[in-house]
Image (cartoon, rainbow, N blue to C red):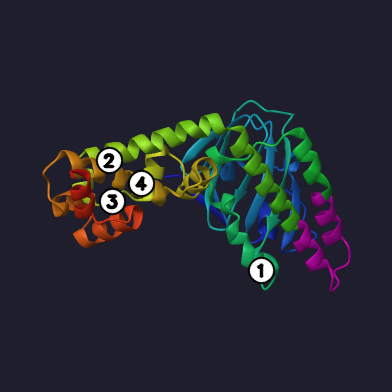
């Protein structure tokens, strides 16, 4: 089992990375090309007690994050929340073109600020690495002045305005990242539509097997795991492409199959409900009526009138 290097402070991260002490104890921007990590730490996974926002370019090898592996020879931007585990396995051959930056933000820095209330809304902090953000050169150029503003501010003498100014810069960076993710979702609609098709097939196969009878209705977490993406990413993708949440799409499929059974079989409403994974037929009846404005029995009778 691989060791986990647990890093509690930004100062400790600087030390382990062979960098000079940070100018500010709670926020720092690190030049990725300047990192000099020992072999022991290279062979370990990392778990930080602070937020990490980073762009890495020219990292020959693989990065492991969220149980996924990703080739990092091209530039990627990714986001790690406190207590998440990631690791990097670089190619043994050196790469002089390695570049990028890391923004480190300790939770204590944003405590009792507007960002503390909203940072959980940026769901990309929970994404696996296969959901990393690919930036265009123009988008990278857009972010650079924001980073310069953060660095300039924490390198000056600390006063009553510094924290609020840095927080404003960070919020701007995260807002731009949200926009860039939206662009990526839009640009990758063909690929994403394939994921939607796989999702729909998974739901259909789930109900066509005995799994629903044994395990109940499929959870979003279960379906996301089958697709090898996170539930948050799946929810955002489905909302972007279909305008509906995973739960809504699952319910639609339930109603579709239920209508088919009500009109082509002699199964009772209770049997249909149990076969679809409902523990109580009343829950099925309530969902069916909410979606169709008829009870299952009313629907069956109206169909054969």
Label 1 or label 2, whichever lies nearer to me, is 2
Secondary structure under badge 3? loop
In primary-sequence order, the first of circles 4 and 2 is: 2
| Mark 3 to mark 4 CA distance (whole Å) | 12 Å
Front in this rendered view, residue 198 or 92: 198
| Mark 1 to mark 2 CA distance (whole Å) | 45 Å
Q: Are marks 3 and 4 in contact (CB under 8 Å)?
A: no
Most extreme residue toward the right, as rendered? 157
Residue drawn at the location 54% of the way across and 34% of the way down? 70
Instruction: From the image, tell me which residue sits under label 1.
Output: 108
Q: Which quarter of the figure has residue 150?
A: bottom right
Image check: 49 left or right of 242?
right
| Mark 4 to mark 1 CA distance (whole Å) | 44 Å
| Mark 3 to mark 2 CA distance (whole Å) | 9 Å
Residue 285 in the image: state x and y as whole percent: 24, 58
Q: Is residue 208 above or below residue 80?
A: above
Secondary structure under badge 4? helix
Instruction: From the image, tell me which residue sits under label 2.
Output: 206
Q: Is residue 117 above or below residue 59?
A: below
Instruction: From the image, tell me which residue sits under label 3.
Output: 217
| Mark 4 to mark 2 CA distance (whole Å) | 14 Å
Instruction: From the image, tell me which residue sits under label 4.
Output: 252
Q: Which residues are magenta?
A: 146-169
In primary-sequence order, the first of circles 3 and 4 is: 3
Residue 31 in the image: state x and y as whole percent: 76, 44
Q: Is residue 115 above or below residue 147?
A: below
Position of the C terminus by quadrant = top left
Label 3 or label 4, whichever lies nearer to me, is 4
Q: Which quarter of the figure has residue 203?
A: top left
Secondary structure under badge 2? helix
């Amino acid at each position: 089992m691989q060791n986990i290097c647990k890093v509690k402070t930004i100062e400790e991260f600087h030390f382990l990375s062979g960098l000079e002490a940070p100018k500010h104890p709670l926020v720092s921007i690190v030049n990725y090309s300047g990192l000099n990590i020992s072999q022991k730490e290279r062979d370990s996974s990392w778990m930080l007690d602070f937020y990490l926002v980073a762009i890495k370019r020219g990292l020959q090898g693989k990065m492991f994050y969220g149980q996924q592996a990703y080739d990092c020879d091209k530039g990627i931007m990714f986001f790690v929340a406190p207590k998440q585990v990631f690791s990097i396995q670089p190619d043994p051959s050196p790469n002089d073109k390695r570049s990028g930056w890391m923004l480190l933000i300790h939770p204590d820095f944003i405590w009792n600020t507007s960002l503390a209330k909203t940072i959980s809304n940026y769901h990309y902090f929970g994404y696996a690495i296969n959901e990393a953000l690919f930036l265009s050169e123009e988008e990278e150029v857009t972010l650079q002045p924001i980073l310069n503003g953060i660095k300039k501010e924490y390198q000056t003498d600390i006063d009553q305005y510094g924290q609020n100014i840095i927080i404003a810069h960070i919020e701007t960076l995260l807002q731009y990242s949200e926009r860039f993710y939206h662009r990526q979702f839009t640009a990758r609609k063909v690929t994403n539509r394939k994921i939607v098709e796989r999702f729909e097939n998974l739901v259909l196969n789930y109900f066509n097997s005995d799994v629903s009878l044994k395990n109940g209705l499929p959870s979003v977490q279960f379906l996301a795991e089958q697709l090898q993406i996170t539930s948050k990413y799946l929810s955002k993708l489905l909302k972007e492409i279909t305008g509906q949440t995973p739960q809504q799409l699952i319910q639609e499929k339930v109603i579709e199959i239920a209508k088919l059974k009500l009109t082509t079989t002699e199964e009772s409403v209770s049997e249909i409900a149990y076969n679809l994974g409902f523990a109580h037929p009343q829950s099925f009846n309530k969902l069916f009526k909410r979606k169709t404005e008829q009870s299952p029995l009313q629907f069956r009778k109206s169909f054969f009138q």
